[in-house]
Image: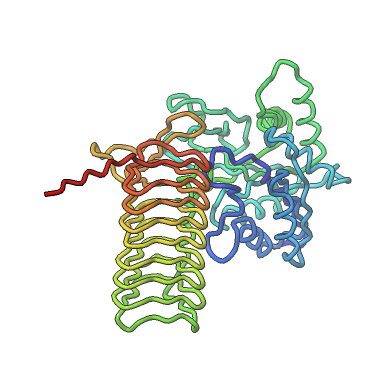
Amino acid sequence: MTATLPTLIILAGGASSRMWPLREKLLLRFGTEPLLISQLRRFQALGFTDVVVVANPESANEITALVSHIHPMRVQVVVQQEAKGMGDALLTAANMIPHASGTPIFVTQIHDVVDDQLYLDLLKAHAADPSVSYGAGYEQDEYFPGGYLIVDGSGRINGIVEKPGAENRPSKLVNIVAHIHADAARLFGAIRMEYERADVTTDDHYERAMDTLMKDTVYRVVPYTGAWTALKFPFHVLDVMNYYLSKIQGQNIAESAFISPLASIRGDVYIGERVKVFPGAAIVGPAYIGADTIVGNNSLVRNSMVLSHCEVGFTTEIARSYVADHVSMHACRVLDSVFASNVNFSAGCTTANLRIDRSDVPTMIKGQRIKSGRDKLGAIIGAGAFLGVDVMTMPGVKIGEGAQVGPGTHVHHDVKDRARVYVKQELIVVEE
């Protein structure tokens, strides 16, 4: 790529409240590195050298430590003190671009996972005509509850319509936050004007600023039909997991790993350093097994990602699930689920994943019942939770950080952080 690429601004300052019981989505690992770092390495490979990451107060220190190892990229971290939307985030980043007049910027979100082809197409268009601004348009037949681009026959974007409804879509092009603005100062000025409006109470200042600019300046669409996965809700972890699993080609097995000759390894599989796979175990790709994890006798891991220092105990099945570091599982069933780190999933536990009526599995997000879009969805379990023997979670249930669920409990509703849930039992002894 050209050596004079736009300054990259990565918006990573959101509160992640819709991801409960999981924490910062940009720090989730889908392999050996957090999502933020794996995304930054992709941009580095494309030739970007100057980056501004907008973080929130909770994640700023960890992000600063992580990006300090990305060389020779120049990565600056700024803190958005409150989650006031993308417009406020960009004005926070503006302080890091002192000479913004005529300076192009590339704005994106770390939790949008797409193929490199989208970025290549955007940069190619920018190189051909740097005086024009560009926006990505994801071509989709099914309705998506997001922003849609108003595009004329020449490919010029004339505006953005937020959530117009399936019957009122101005095009089939969904707005992805992958935008090249030809003049950063002009964008920042338009955002500031939106903040001066007293008649608007929503936090979509960035979108409204872009809509205004599109009336007077040239924005062109760069269509995209490849993969697009956005981390918005906790079950989307499974979609991002599948994206990264699809990148595994062949069998990549570390030399220090022990694979029993009586174990079965099939398909595209990554097995990390010092992994132990015991007799009778089966790993069916696509699958990822992180360093120092034990896959016990007669267990099964398929279409899943199990990170480092985990124990996949005897006869355990893990299917289509994401399991973070230091999770212990013993003679249990983990189905279509997401486990944060340090979860204990005791013997006999099962995450039910299918409704009796086989319909969409709903789940609660910030007090609202929403559709997951999945006919199979197990549990989302927060870090440090402990589930006793024979616990069963119903489809779509979420269990908070540090929660404790007593043995034999059937969990039908979400469990708050650090709550204790158990079933009262009466022991009756009949003596002859």
As drawn, 269 above or below 132: below
Image side of residue 298 versus residue 214, left or right:
left
Image side of residue 19 versus residue 389, left or right:
right
As drawn, 195 above or below 74: above
The structure residue drawn at horizontal position 76% and vertical position 19%, both measured from the top left corner, is 197
Q: Which residue lies furthest to the left in this view?
A: 432
Image side of residue 288 versus residue 63, left or right:
left
Q: Which residue lies furthest to the right in this view?
A: 99
Residue 242 visible? The answer is no
Q: Position of residue 46 (x, y in %)?
A: 66, 62
Specify the quadrant that holds the N terminus: bottom right
Q: Where is residue 230 in the image (x, y as percent from the top left)?
A: 53, 46
Q: Nearer the viewer, residue 38 or 147?
A: 38
The structure residue drawn at horizontal position 44% and vertical position 34%, both measured from the top left corner, is 364
Q: Where is residue 333 in the image (x, y as percent from the top left)?
A: 32, 56
Q: Residue furthest top?
A: 199
Residue 82 visible? The answer is yes
Q: Nearer the viewer, residue 416 or 251?
A: 416
Q: Which of 79 and 252 is in front in this view?
A: 79
How many callouts does the rendering have?
0
The structure residue drawn at horizontal position 33% and vertical position 37%, both measured from the top left corner, is 360
| Quadrant in which residue 72 is drawn | bottom right
Q: Where is residue 290 in the image (x, y as percent from the top left)?
A: 49, 69
| Quadrant in which residue 14 is drawn | top right
Image side of residue 192 versus residue 215, left or right:
right
Q: Which of 77 and 274 is in front in this view?
A: 274
The structure residue drawn at horizontal position 41% and vertical position 65%, both measured from the top left corner, is 287
